[in-house]
Image (tube, rainbow, N blue to C red):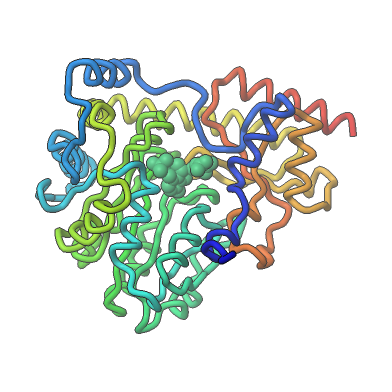
Amino acid sequence: MKEANSILTGYGTTIFTVMSALAVEHNAINLGQGFPDTDGPLDILTEAMLATKNQSNQYPPMMGIPELRQAAAAHSKIFYDIDLDWESQTIVTSGATEAIAACLFGLIEPGDEVVLIEPLYDCYLPIVRRAGAIPKLVRIAPPDWDLPYEELEAAFSEKTKLILLNTPTNPAAKVYTIEELEFIAGLIKKHDAYAICDEVYEHLVYDGRQHVPLITLPGMAERCIRISSAGKTFSMTGWKVGYSVGAAKLINAVSKAHQFLTFTTPPNLQKAVAFGLKKDMDYFKGLRGEMESKRDRLSKGLASIGFEVMDSQGTYFLAADFRPLGFDCDDVKFCKDLTKDSGVAAVPFSAFYQAGTDSGVNHFVRFCYCKQDHIIDTALERLSDYFNRI
Ligand code: PMP
Ligand code: GLN
């Protein structure tokens, strides 16, 4: 029998699914896979319900419903002063994941090089490779996760088609500085490349930091696609409504892939997300403030238990080093034991590096803090009991 595709079958089941299944099996609190344990705003849920009942549930337009595309353009204008023509410069996709795949399939020619920064979100490498591109990996390292300028420069060549940039970044919880973004923009211009900018955590940046989309830097409007997702902005990760904005030429290329991948996205959810994007500033500030206080709650608790906790500048996540607790096993064993024996699940950091390479950070775990305060407190109690016991 002929084999299935070797690139994709070479990957196991995603770490999020593996750890969530283990959490269920052991009745553990799931601080692994990144999803809130309460749903987002009731008015957005109600809007989806009303749209389901009162509007057509047949195929909406391939590019997305005008209302959501207009709302996405307006949102980028309000928050970042980006001027967009909604008809040629916006597209709705089924989650940011589909947007990433459609961008890569739409832009890559087999043999192109794609620059990526490790640790990275798990779907990037498989899709880049399946699209026929050659990944060029650069690493940021703890505790500061600073961008190594020389290594990044060396990763670019005349074959570079694009860089896939994620800020705020999962799992390192780093928010790229303006200087770093300027450096990246310089390389993009020098090498006539593009950037796919995964900005799903755009509203989750803390301590007074600002999210700066790369597309707002000089010369970047023609070269960047900015991707966001309702999953993170409205705490409905199951909805899988994403959108991308950028130069008409790039969005057109994305649409050529999107039309053959999913073609469209549920109309009721698009309608509700359009409603959500029109919320006033208080909503977005509230979301950020709430998540920042959860970050503080979990960071402080883990530090008092004995973890060395890295700074979490944004996202749902924080990275913690478990060596100060006296463990020298690898991160996968640590996370599996933790889930079974303490009743708290987390994700091993090595999952965010190219498989088969030494990440150099085999003693880190990623904890997710977008959970109710009493759940965070119970998780901390369980962890404290566990480390006192062993
Ligand atoms: N990018 C990053 C960095 C993520 O953490 C996630 C996880 N939600 C996604 C993309 C996927 O977003 P969506 O669920 O909208 O497909
Ligand atoms: N983005 C989520 C995380 O990083 C997981 C999404 C998924 O399970 N595919 O935890």
Quick check: can you spot residue 212?
A: no
Q: On the rendered image, what quadrant is the N terminus found in?
A: bottom right
Q: Is residue 73 above or below residue 112?
A: above
Q: Is residue 11 above or below residue 73?
A: below
Front residue (pair 145, 351): 351
Left or right? Give the position of 292 relative to 16. left
Q: On the rendered image, what quadrant is the C terminus found in?
A: top right
Front residue (pair 249, 371): 249
Left or right? Give the position of 92 relative to 381. left
Q: Is residue 13 above or below residue 53?
A: below
Q: Position of residue 37 (x, y in %)?
A: 52, 24
Q: Position of residue 232 (x, y in %)?
A: 40, 36
Q: At x 59% / y 57%, what residue is drawn?
A: 11
What is the total number of numbered labels drawn onto the structure image?
Answer: 0
Front residue (pair 241, 371): 241
Q: At x 35% / y 69%, what residue is drawn?
A: 162
Q: Is residue 178 above or below residue 296?
A: below
Quick check: can you spot residue 48?
A: yes
When asked about the image quadrant of residue 336, the answer is: top right
Left or right? Give the position of 304 relative to 376. right
Q: Position of residue 246 (x, y in %)?
A: 21, 56
Q: Position of residue 236 (x, y in %)?
A: 40, 29
Left or right? Give the position of 30 relative to 178. right
Q: At x 45% / y 26%, what residue is drawn?
A: 290
Front residue (pair 143, 37): 37
Q: Residue furthest front?
A: 1
Q: At x 52% / y 63%, what residue is drawn?
A: 5
Q: Residue furthest right?
A: 390
